[in-house]
Image (cartoon, helix red, strand yellow):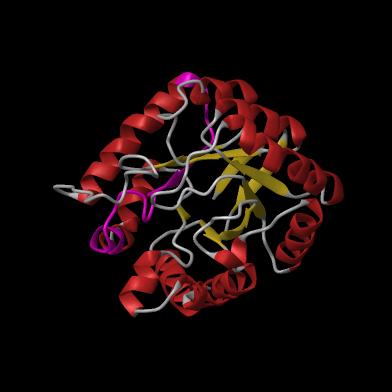
Amino acid sequence: MFTLNCKGRLLVIDKPVVMGIINITPDSFYSGSRRQGTDAVLKQAEQMLKDGATILDIGGQSTRPGSEKLSAGQELERIIDPIAAISSHFPDTFISADTYYAEVAKEAVAAGASMVNDISAGSIDRKMISTVAALQVPYVLMHMQGTPQTMQQQPVYENVTKEVLDFFIHKKDELLQAGIPDIIIDPGFGFGKTIAHNFELLRNLPVFKMLQAPLLLGISRKSTISKTLGINAEEALNGTTVLNTIGLMNGAAILRVHDVKEANEAITLFNNYQS
């Protein structure tokens, strides 16, 4: 069981939970996740909460391979009003701000977010770690080789599991020393990894339990599924459910997904299988 302090409210993870993805972008890799305008975001949030989402992850910038990098100001214009609206309409919801900018994290938390999801582990904006420490909110620590613009240009590891684990061991210690006690671990599927790397990490997910932090699995509709099956992202729901189920069996505590209902069903069946 894990307990995360989200701005004074406790998020207790004693069984796996779902993080629903809401992308306020025109260019995310899966078109079904794109939302424009506060009304559309609120409608999507309401549906995801009805379908069983515990956390909503709000992002204003695509981080797909080769994506265009936006400024902090552009991100703020996209996400602050929707975060404030979700917080107002659904005050019991745990909102995660998906950003690698410290300024955006600070404004998002002020608007109602209670968690920061940073794909860069503080490497893009060096102020991020000290900012999150000051905000006293949980931090999703993700591994990425390179940047979204370069990460899929022939990623290479001698031993991907060992290298990612070593990264987390050192980075978690850095975060604890900086004053961030509540850390979520995300191996970063598809972020500077080949399909083979992703499957190896999924097989070895139990190794990351030694970090004594919730494990986040973010593999929803990604190219590991679509390329392996010879389909596109729109057709990758079944494959997503299969890999989410494998992830649950290997220790995943949070499923970050586009399709909340199906992920929640997988968790329900898994919990019954376990009991």
Q: Tell me residue 40's x, y (percent).
A: 77, 59
Q: At 38% across and 63% down in the image, what residue appears?
A: 250
- Magenta-drawn stretch contains 104: no
Q: Tell me residue 138's x, y (percent).
A: 58, 36
Q: List the single residue furthest toward the left.
A: 158
Q: At 29% across and 43% down in the image, what residue appears?
A: 165
- Magenta-drawn stretch contains 196: yes
Residue 24 versus residue 249 in the image, above or below: above
Residue 126 versus residue 82 in the image, above or below: above
Residue 113 in view, yes or no: no
Q: At 63% across and 30% down in the image, what residue appears?
A: 73
| Camera-nearest residue between 203 and 77 | 77
| Camera-nearest residue between 150 and 53 | 150
Examine the image and state in which quarter residue 260 appears.
bottom right
Examine the image and state in which quarter residue 33 appears.
bottom right
Report the side of 86 relative to 212 (left or right).
right
Residue range of the region highlighted in magenta in the rendering = 178-199
Residue 87 versus residue 237 in the image, above or below: above
| Camera-nearest residue between 9 and 143 | 143
The number of callouts visible is: 0
Examine the image and state in which quarter residue 109 appears.
top right
Residue 102 in view, yes or no: yes
Q: Tell me residue 172's x, y (percent).
A: 40, 32
Q: Tell me residue 231's x, y (percent).
A: 40, 78
Report the side of 151 relative to 117 (left or right).
left
